[in-house]
Amino acid sequence: MPAVIPEKTSLSSFLRGFLNSYSQVFFSNSKIFAIILIIVSFLDFHTGLSGLIAVLVSNAAALGIGFNRRNIANGYYGFNSLLAGLGIGVMYQSGPAFFTILFFASLLTLFLTATMEGVIGKYGLPYLSVPFLLGIWLVTLAARQFASLQINESGIYQMNELYAWGGQSLVDVYNWFNTLPLPESLRLYFRSLGAIFFQYHLFGGILVAIGLIIYSRIAFLLSLTGFFSAWFYYHFIGANITELSYGYIGFNFILTAIAVGGYFIIPSRWSFLWVILLTPLISILLTSSYTVFALFQLSVFSLPFNLIVLIFLYALKFRERFLTTPELVSYQQHSPEKNLYSHNNYKIRFGKVFFLPLALPFSGRWKVTQGHQGAYTHTGEWQYAWDFEVTDEDDATFSGSGERPEDFYGYNKPVLAPEAGWVEEILDEYDDNQIGKMDLEHNWGNTLIIRHNDQLYSKLSHLKKGSFKVVTGERVSKGQHVANCGNSGRSPAPHLHFQLQPTPHIGSKTIEYPVSHFILHEKDRFSLRSYEVPVEGMQVSNIRHNSTLQKAFHFIPGQVLRYQVKCDNAEPAEVSWEVQVDAYNNTCIWCQKSRSKAWFRNDGDLHYFTHFEGDRASLLYRFFLGAYKVLLGHYRNLVVTDNYPVHTFNKPLLIFLQDLVAPFFLFTRSTFRLHYLELEDELMQTGFRLKSETTLSIGKRVTKRLETEWQIGTSGIESFRVLDEGKTIEATLIES
């Protein structure tokens, strides 16, 4: 049985869900931020207790009903109830009636959350705090008929409550913050931050701002951009600035800025521009909705934020062009920085992986003698095609006189299927031409067309008559021998014509399409190219796989890797890793001791890690860095390069500064280089030594470095040695 990543226990999900219910208000899953927000909510003890009870009731009910445990753990079912609980706690005094209403209001908000998840979610949109709005409005309207509920007057005696909770020291701290000589705009900004948790004072807002900086520098910058865009807009148009201070509902601008600028949209200059452009729209909704809701004696709360974000995200779904200005987040990581860095890195590493991974249609090394938009026949609708020939050391295509097809190195060589598919059409009628002559009447000569999917077909032409190994309708596998290279059709000398097309007909127009992975040969040098278009003059080949490397980096779910580890003069210790798979067939190496995971993929040509979660002081983290991308074939002196997300390998202070300007430019870069050294056994192609290097650079200056040396043998990764800024770690395989 595969080693499946275990589900979180109910208790674990509940505890994580409790904390994330607080931080999720700011689209975060930071535990530190959650703790700060809990403290802020308890600056008014009664309000904080109400919010806490609401979260506990909501999450307990979600678990009891059987809602998705991952969503509970992420706080998705708790944060709306938290806001409703805080709002009810601010408005009404404690008592049996209050706690009864609080309990059922929490349940109501939970059910509204589940309903909005279905109603709004079916459009691919977030439900935000819509359930909170509906819940608190319904409770507020209904509570006017509940004689046992009393209006809360605790704010009048707030100093007494602070004294009872933290003594005179806490009162002094509170008063010191409230008397800080700050500009009125900044005071209002902090109060608006605190108002998100129904704490309408400077002290709470400053605590929230500190937590926001710890959680995300980009989110903090967005909060300033959103609020002060509103501040200057109100002054510019002569609007009533007191609208921002009434209930401190300026938080609508702050939450909209964080949501649009960095959470649902990749942070960039475009996302910041849209934050500014949406400011007047929020203002219009604030003013108009306040006028309407005042008739019912209701607060608009976060209504403008919800409407603007939902309308904007929905409108972006109708775009046909400019899809990256701004660009929607496809994989949510609950951090603007991670969303940005991982997105940029993914585009560089895997931006073309959505292409079907087509290989070159031959074995060995061939030369591109005519590429895309060639000078001879690759023009117009047929411009995206290749002609391949085999050459010798002197770049000659034949030996002897070159008067017969048999004199040419490529003649009668096997032609391979570039990807799995079905044989759509075969044309096998024409004899080979005499060298120098062409059959202009039958341009393509003998041809094979393979259907890979309904929009992608490969066409192989100028094939040798009678050499076909397949029949029409047959299923072929990638790399299968399908025919031989010939000299039929418009072909003066034996060569292979290869093109991709959207339709199955001989003569169809071509489409531009890359080759997934191939080796570029340059004299004594080799380089790996991925998802590129080979150009004229290149000597190229498919990757020649090595069984030893394939075995070493073929991690199978359930496999256990045990290493003896020695760090400098410390006593040797053992680490044990297990290969696991999640419900979506994503695979990772799991270290129970450090609670870390290194997620990876293997496409048969390459092993590469995608991301790391957990302890960055662990051996698994260094293993992840050192084996970030490995070609599963050996080429002496080959260097494989790649890039890490900016936050993966960086110094804390440096990444803090980089975060602040990351939406506009990156001044740091983390790179990976893997060197293929000598073989111990050239004949058997076993016993590899590899050396990888991880560097952090500012411009051209390297500021941080990690080196790893690998010994690969028949039993797998037999040992590796890490040099990490003066520290030496040696790991020797015990069990694989």
Image (spheres, rainbow, N blue to C red):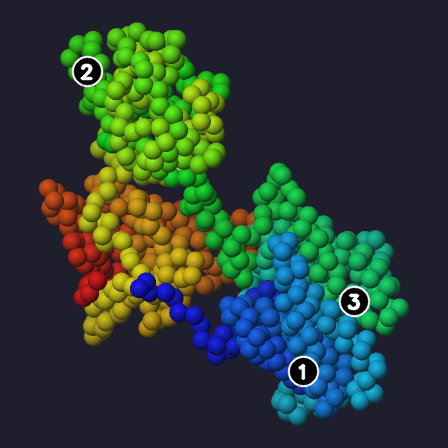
The residue beneath circle 2 is 406
693 left or right of 249 in image:
left
Residue 139: x percent and y percent?
A: 76, 76
Q: Residues within 10 Å of mark 2 (few under 14, many from 20)?
A: some
Q: Nearer the viewer, mark 3 or mark 1?
A: 1
Query: Do the residues under discs 2 and 1 have CB atoms within 8 angstroms?
Result: no
Residue 103 tag number:
1
656 left or right of 326 in image:
left
Q: Secondary structure at mark 3?
A: loop
Residue 704: x percent and y percent?
A: 36, 57
Which amino acid type is marked by label 2? Glu
- Cα gap from disc 3 to disc 1, whole angstroms: 23 Å
Which amino acid type is marked by label 1? Phe
Which is nearer the N-term, disc 2 or disc 1? 1
560 left or right of 258 in image:
left
Question: Taking 602 as reference, is 356 above or below it?
Answer: above
The residue beneath circle 3 is 300
Q: Residue at x 27, y 25 (%)?
A: 468
Query: Do the residues under discs 2 and 3 have CB atoms within 8 angstroms?
Result: no
- Cα gap from disc 2 to disc 3, whole angstroms: 84 Å
The answer, for residue 261, to whether it is visible in the render is no
- Cα gap from disc 2 to disc 1, whole angstroms: 87 Å
Which one is nearer the viewer's eye here, 626 or 93?
Answer: 93
Question: Taking 438 as reference, is 638 above or below it?
Answer: below
Q: Secondary structure at mark 1?
A: helix
Which amino acid type is marked by label 3? Val
Residue 482: x percent and y percent?
A: 28, 29
Q: Residue at x 66, y 63 (%)?
A: 116
Question: Taking 306 as reference, is 570 above or below it?
Answer: below
Which is nearer the N-term, disc 3 or disc 1? 1
Which is nearer the N-term, disc 2 or disc 3? 3
